[in-house]
Image (cartoon, helix red, strand yellow):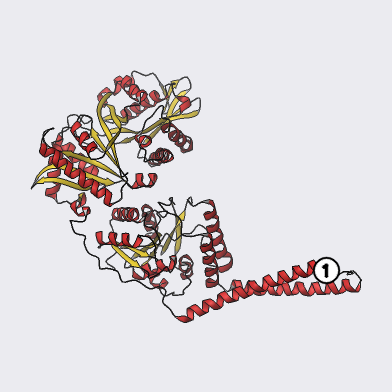
Amino acid sequence: MSPIDISVVVGVYNEAEVLDELERRLTAAIKALGRTYEIILVDDGSRDESLEIMLKLRNRDPEHIRALSFTRNFGHHIALTAGLDNAKGDVIITMDADLQDQPEEIQKLLAKLDEGYDVVWGERETRQFKWYKNFTSWLFLWLMNSVARAEVHLNSSIFRAIRRDVADDLMQLREKARYLPGLVSWLGYRQTSIPVEHGKRFAGETKYSLWRLLKLALSTATSFSAAPLQIATISGMGTAALAVLAVIYIIIRKFLGAYTVPGYASIMIAVFFFGALQLIVIGLMGEYISRIYREAQGRPLYLLKALPVAKEISRKHSVATLANRMSSLNPNETAAIANAIANDSHLPLAKVFAGTSQTELAEYHLASWRGADPFVFTSGNGNRIDAVSLITELDWDTRILGFPTARILYANGFGGATDVGRINSFSKVINESLELARSKKIRLIDARVSTEDLFISRALEASGFHLVDVLVTLGAASKKFDNILSRSKYDRLDNVLDFGDGLIVRSMRQSDVPALAHISEISYGDHTMIQDRFFLEPIIAEDRAQDIFREWFENLARNHEEGGAMVLVAEVNGVESGYLGIEAMAPISGSKWWKDTLNAVAPEARGRGVYRALVMSAFDYAKNHGAAGLITKTQSSTNRVINSWLHSGADVLESFATLHWTSN
């Protein structure tokens, strides 16, 4: 058994803008699987800084990242071949570097492989190429199936998982003209596909121009089949037959006296036609002869450069060594952080979970943060911690926004508000967090600070953060549910709440999703109603901000279908006019609160009591499902939302300032 479970092979050609993000997402995705792994980056003669960045990534994590570099550009499929030659894993994943093959989808390939297949490739559900790239890719694969008999599915891709024994057999095929999907198909074995999400290119431009695709098509066609020569032979025989018929026809017409003047046009057409046919046939023969010549030369598929030996970067020059991941902390270090956080009188949810001890609340937050495995920066002496900062990269936000994004999950300095020691300690951990962000080329960091702790807000602003909005938490414990529900009259019929005047609230159906996704997108883009931090941040393009809320809703809808959330839908006279989604929070002290995850009302339905009906329906649902309480978070500028909750009998529980740091 190999000591490595998974090898990921990535061909790299002029991808300097992508590599940091590729490594971050790949590492996070494979770590989440809990398997041993290696990432093999193969530089295919890049002309930008790709190799330098690859070496930096390797030096930062030499246990998991390996780098190979060609002496020149040998080609995409040969780069993947070099990676396969050097892979040690029981399962090998091949993928492109541009992040259109998304690392988060690897688990789908592996799950399908575990069903007993030997090869699983990703079938792109929606191709994110431009139209001409989609067409040329489809045309290329169609030619492979029609001419070369490669039998590669028309929506196939390089993104695939293969077992060790398949890779070993594949490495025996050493022909110079390589098209890996065709070679893998030729091997046989048990192969299948699985739908995967195809992302947009993270940065840069595609390296496959129309000319390169045509060259690959011709090369592959002549590698996998003699059909082009057979077609040329058949065409020649067919043309010869037509020529014989034409000669007979011309002779007969000549004897009948039909030609009084010789025909220039027909002669030129014949010359051009037969000349073109001869050139095509000669060209095809030349392609086969040149292929025989290259194979007979016996040159290696590729040549590798000698690269510097991997070494750890010194602490003096690398911020990454100044912090540990939370998962790497020992029990004493974790306990020290928990004790420090328990002394924070402004801990999030302290007023929501009233009566819960600070120690229990600190453990609650640490448990929720462990899943993100943040970098931990601390300042202090021995077991005494004077300041702490937890920062984590945000995979989902990064994918949607199109640039690396992170969040400070928690940051505080402990002591008096004007204590110089507190100020210095807090500034130290924040500046170290920002150094880490710069080293990872993170462009946006999100942080939230209690509005009652002005010291932390001012300290963050001094470090380059800026205020974008204030989030208000409203809600009520279950003891208030009856009083709240008594403030609104509605009738219940088969789990449908009727508020009168054609307004009803019911559970979401699958057919509602397109209309509600559209409402989500346009509602949050209406700045007269909502001033959300995504739209207030200049670094974020407005279309990206709208994409966030559309995908946020689509994720919520999937969670609803899987039973992890409840989406309540408001109808006005039979038309979907808004929604409110609620999800259960992690339990604390044996009680489980629910939270309003996302909500939106169609612009044309505002002022008709739609949102108030949704809020009442949420309280009704929470009561009937034994919730200990229900909360929502909203911007301080959304007066209608705040008033709806306050008029219902809910309370303002806490408020947090949202601050952003941007790299520019």
- Left or right, 155 with respect to 89, comes to right
Q: Is residue 553 visible?
A: yes
User: Horizontal and vertical percent for residue 74?
Assistant: 43, 69
How many marks can you see?
Answer: 1
- Work out whether residue 14 or residue 488 is closer to the camera in this orientation and state it: 14
> What amino acid is at disc 1?
Gly
- As drawn, 24 above or below 654: below
Q: Is residue 590 visible?
A: no
Q: Residues within 10 Å of mark 1 (few under 14, many from 20)?
A: few
User: Horizontal and vertical percent for residue 480?
Assistant: 27, 22
- As drawn, 35 above or below 182: above
Report which residue position mark 1 lands on: 263
- As drawn, 583 above or below 651: below
- Work out whether residue 504 or residue 597 is closer to the camera in this orientation and state it: 597
User: Where does the C terminus fall, quadrant-wise?
Assistant: top left
Secondary-structure class at tag 1: loop
User: Horizontal and vertical percent for residue 392?
Assistant: 26, 46
- Work out whether residue 502 or residue 637 is closer to the camera in this orientation and state it: 637
Q: Residue at x 31, y 50 (%)?
A: 441
User: Horizontal and vertical percent for residue 606?
Assistant: 44, 24
- Left or right, 327 with respect to 252, comes to left
User: Where does the N terminus fall, quadrant-wise?
Assistant: bottom left
Q: Residue at x 44, y 59 (%)?
A: 121
- Left or right, 284 with respect to 624, comes to right
- Left or right, 271 with respect to 63, comes to right
